[in-house]
């Protein structure tokens, strides 16, 4: 229903346009009698335009049309709030007004007064299918454009099916919102805070979600907390739990109306919000408002009923398994909302993006049944077709029905994330999912895991976790041209994102001196006597293994150390015994370069410095048979991974533009020999080739165009 002001303007504009058109056509009618088809009016490039008459039938058609329009505007709605002499209404409106059926339906539901400001029991109204039918039609007409057909909301418009509400979820609150609207406002801080302060306070707000992992420094979080306390707590509370009196959001949960990625939060803080919901009190009568509110209440009750069918203990187990399976890391974009997808997986054939696996019905997996979910996880068959093997279904096939059901229930218990999936950018013909069926036939080995009887229960548990949910082989096994794992080279290492997921076969681990405790410490904290996690492995620790029990990590360590079929430890292998730097070594030129570049952080003896840099003596990467990562770290540098609050190492600078290939090769060879026990030299060509690869793909700390001469 338009206001009187706008209704008057609409009528004025319609009548003015109608009058202008009558004048134009009437003018042509008058001058038409003087037209002469033999009289030339204009000439364009030798082509003459004569003054022919307009066909009379065309002018008559216009006249008839004008009369018909005038009659229509008189009899039917067409000008502002004018309803027409015929009293015409749409079919939907007739349902509510023709015979008072909606009023009767509400009265039959026995839910209190249906008119005026009397109280109404929406839960009781929600039991009436007739009332809900009216409410559903109203919702589709007036609300779905913003809140979605399933009322789960869209970005900037809240989910109406949960029990989270900015203003409280009572019946009166719902009715008030529909009748009088809401107008949420948050001031923008771009003129008050600096860009760095906005980034800091946004990072702090994002960190209030306990499970969330952010690539930000502890200093930024401390600064952000101070800024929040001074600027934001007046509305959102000291505990950031929000304030329903003013519609201030609870910032500690996983419900984000305006987007929960770090980028979205920064945008909200920087620019503020002006979030009005229109009032429908002038458009809908009391019965319609009640029916609409009852429909929303029905949606809430259905959601609550579904959640009530989930088992609390099963959900908790599913949460543990989701972290063990690294679901969070893969299905969460960098600094994005948990399980909202959007993380890119570069392949030789293009980028695959992880999908939204929250229970959002339109953008997530809310419409999946359990069987459809299980097929996607274990068979690689989604509702939209075959999945790319970037989704490790070739490993998840081993997950038991019990554990898959627990995973399903956990994901169903999460808040829906309102984020569209990012389209994959795979090249032809890789973008044709039907072809993945052939890939599965050729490379998807569906044989179940074997558990030899002579192995301990601990080893068996470790195999299930390592090859199933943990899917360690997916990264640590080399792949063929079709990007399938090489079955004859299990755990023998693979380059991912220009880092080497190293060889973790039983032979390699034994030779490098890894113990069960070292592996458990490494997976639980990211730090161990054999070194620290970095790059992709740091993300695995941060988002997955640190959430696992030491008992399960110990089982995985046992499996890795003892080996398996195709990964049997050679009894002839000897452990490496690095000597460290002797007095004679410290007279060499290589040591001088080490002391000047590496020793300041890693210590003059390579034994590391607390909270500065890890030990290089006995370090698993230094001692590894493949020097790739040692060279890559020198060329790329490293940033802290913030695995644990108040405990991290300093950043390591890139030496890409500082040292030449020969220098780097000589120093790495020296370090690997003395601190790692490896006597195989690293050549200048190895450094040069890797440098060129890293520079070509722009992942070095600098862009070294020409090789520096040896010094």
Image (cartoon, rainbow, N blue to C red):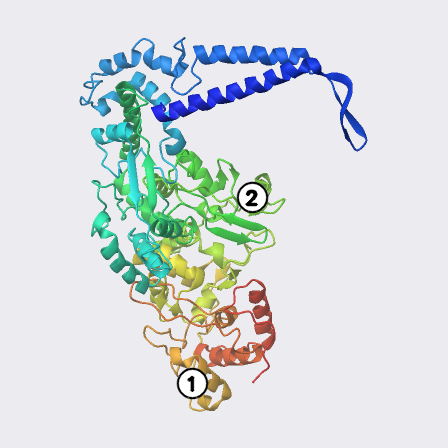
Residue where numbered disc 2 is placed: 440
Dot 1: element: loop
Nearer the observer: mark 2 or 1; the answer is 1
For label 2, the SS is helix
| Quadrant in which residue 126 is drawn | top left
Q: Is residue 293 visible?
A: yes
Residue 169 in picture, x, y percent from top left: 23, 34
The quadrant of the rendering that contains the C terminus is bottom right
Residue 251: which disc?
Answer: none
Residue 432 drawn at (x, y percent): 59, 41
Q: Residue farthest to the front?
A: 34
708 and 629: which one is in front?
Answer: 708
Instruction: Work out whether 682 lies above or below 405.
Output: below
Camera-side residue: 45 or 531?
45
Category of crowding for the residue at label 2, using alpha-carbon neighbours closer than 10 angstroms: few (below 14), some (14–19), many (at least 20)? some
Q: Where is residue 651 in the image (x, y as percent from the top left)?
A: 40, 70
Q: Could you tell whether 555 is left or right of 233 in the image? A: right
User: The N terminus lies in which quarter of the figure?
Assistant: top left
Callout 1: 10 Å neighbours few (<14), some, many (20+)?
Answer: some
Q: Do the residues labelled 2 and 1 touch (CB within 8 Å)?
A: no
Image spot of residue 50 (x, y percent): 76, 22
- Give the residue drawn at x 49%, y 81%: 670
Q: Distance between the residues labelled 2 and 1?
A: 52 Å
For the image, the number of numbered tags is 2
Asked which quadrant contains residue 178, the reply is top left
Q: Which of 692 and 704 is in front in this view?
A: 704
Disc 1 target residue: 581
């Amino acid at each position: 229903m338009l206001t009187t002001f706008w209704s008057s303007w609409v009528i004025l504009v319609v009548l003015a346009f109608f009058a202008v058109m009558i004048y134009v056509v009437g003018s042509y009618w008058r001058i038409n009698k003087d037209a002469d088809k033999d009289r030339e009016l204009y000439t364009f490039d030798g082509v003459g335009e004569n003054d022919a008459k307009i066909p009379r039938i065309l002018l008559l058609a216009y006249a008839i049309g004008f009369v018909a329009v005038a009659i229509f505007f008189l009899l039917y709605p067409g000008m502002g709030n004018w309803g027409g002499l015929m009293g015409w209404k749409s079919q939907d409106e007739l349902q509510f007004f023709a015979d008072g059926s909606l009023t009767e339906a509400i009265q039959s539901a026995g839910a209190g007064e249906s008119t005026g400001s009397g109280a109404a029991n929406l839960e009781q109204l929600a039991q009436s299918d007739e009332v809900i039918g009216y409410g559903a039609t109203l919702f589709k007409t007036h609300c779905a454009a913003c809140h979605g057909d399933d009322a789960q909301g869209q970005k900037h418009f809240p989910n109406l099916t949960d029990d989270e509400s900015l203003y409280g979820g009572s019946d009166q609150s719902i009715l008030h919102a529909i009748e009088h609207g809401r107008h949420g406002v948050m001031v923008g801080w771009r003129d008050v805070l600096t860009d760095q302060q906005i980034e800091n306070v946004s990072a702090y707000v994002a960190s209030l979600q306990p499970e969330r992992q952010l690539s930000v420094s502890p200093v930024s979080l401390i600064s952000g907390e101070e800024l929040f306390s001074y600027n934001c707590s007046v509305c959102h509370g000291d505990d950031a739990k929000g304030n329903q009196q003013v519609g201030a959001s609870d910032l500690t949960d996983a419900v984000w109306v305006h987007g929960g990625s770090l980028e979205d939060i920064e945008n909200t803080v920087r620019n503020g919000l002006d979030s009005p919901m229109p009032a429908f009190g002038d458009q809908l009568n009391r019965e319609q408002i009640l029916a609409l509110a009852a429909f929303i209440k029905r949606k809430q009750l259905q959601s609550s009923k579904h959640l009530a069918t989930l088992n609390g203990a099963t959900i908790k187990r599913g949460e543990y398994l989701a972290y063990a399976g690294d679901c969070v890391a893969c299905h969460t974009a960098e600094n994005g909302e948990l399980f909202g997808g959007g993380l890119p997986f570069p392949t030789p054939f293009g980028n695959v993006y992880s999908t939204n696996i929250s229970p959002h019905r339109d953008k997530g997996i809310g419409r999946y049944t359990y069987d459809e979910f299980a097929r996607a996880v274990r068979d690689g068959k989604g509702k939209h077709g075959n999945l790319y093997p970037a989704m490790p279904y070739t490993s998840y096939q081993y997950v038991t029905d019990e554990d898959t059901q627990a995973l399903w229930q956990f994901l169903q218990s999460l808040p829906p994330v309102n984020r569209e999936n990012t389209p994959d950018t795979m090249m032809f013909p890789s973008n044709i999912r039907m072809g993945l069926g052939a890939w599965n036939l050729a490379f998807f080995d569906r044989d179940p895991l074997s558990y030899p009887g002579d192995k301990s229960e601990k080893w068996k548990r470790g195999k299930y976790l390592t090859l199933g949910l943990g899917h360690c082989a997916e990264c640590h096994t080399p792949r063929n041209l079709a990007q399938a794992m090489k079955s004859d080279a299990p755990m023998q290492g693979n380059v991912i994102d220009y880092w080497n997921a190293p060889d973790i076969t039983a032979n390699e681990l034994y030779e490098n001196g890894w113990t069960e405790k070292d592996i458990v410490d490494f997976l639980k904290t990211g730090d161990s006597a054999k070194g620290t996690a970095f790059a992709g492995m740091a993300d695995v620790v941060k988002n997955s293994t640190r959430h696992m029990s030491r008992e399960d990590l110990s089982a995985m360590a046992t499996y890795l150390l003892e080996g398996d079929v195709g990964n049997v430890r050679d009894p002839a292998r000897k452990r490496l015994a690095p000597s460290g730097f002797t007095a004679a070594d410290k007279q060499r030129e290589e040591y001088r370069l080490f002391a000047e570049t590496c020793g300041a952080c890693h210590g003059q003896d390579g034994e590391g410095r607390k909270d500065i840099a890890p030990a290089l003596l006995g370090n698993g990467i230094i001692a590894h048979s493949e020097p790739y990562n040692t060279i890559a770290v020198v060329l790329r540098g490293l940033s802290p991974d913030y695995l644990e609050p108040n405990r991290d190492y300093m950043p390591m600078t890139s030496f890409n533009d500082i040292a030449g290939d020969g220098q780097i090769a000589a120093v790495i060879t020296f370090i690997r020999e003395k601190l790692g026990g490896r006597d195989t030299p690293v050549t200048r060509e190895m450094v040069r080739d890797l440098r060129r690869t890293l520079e070509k793909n722009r992942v070095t700390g600098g862009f070294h165009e020409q090789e520096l001469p040896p010094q």
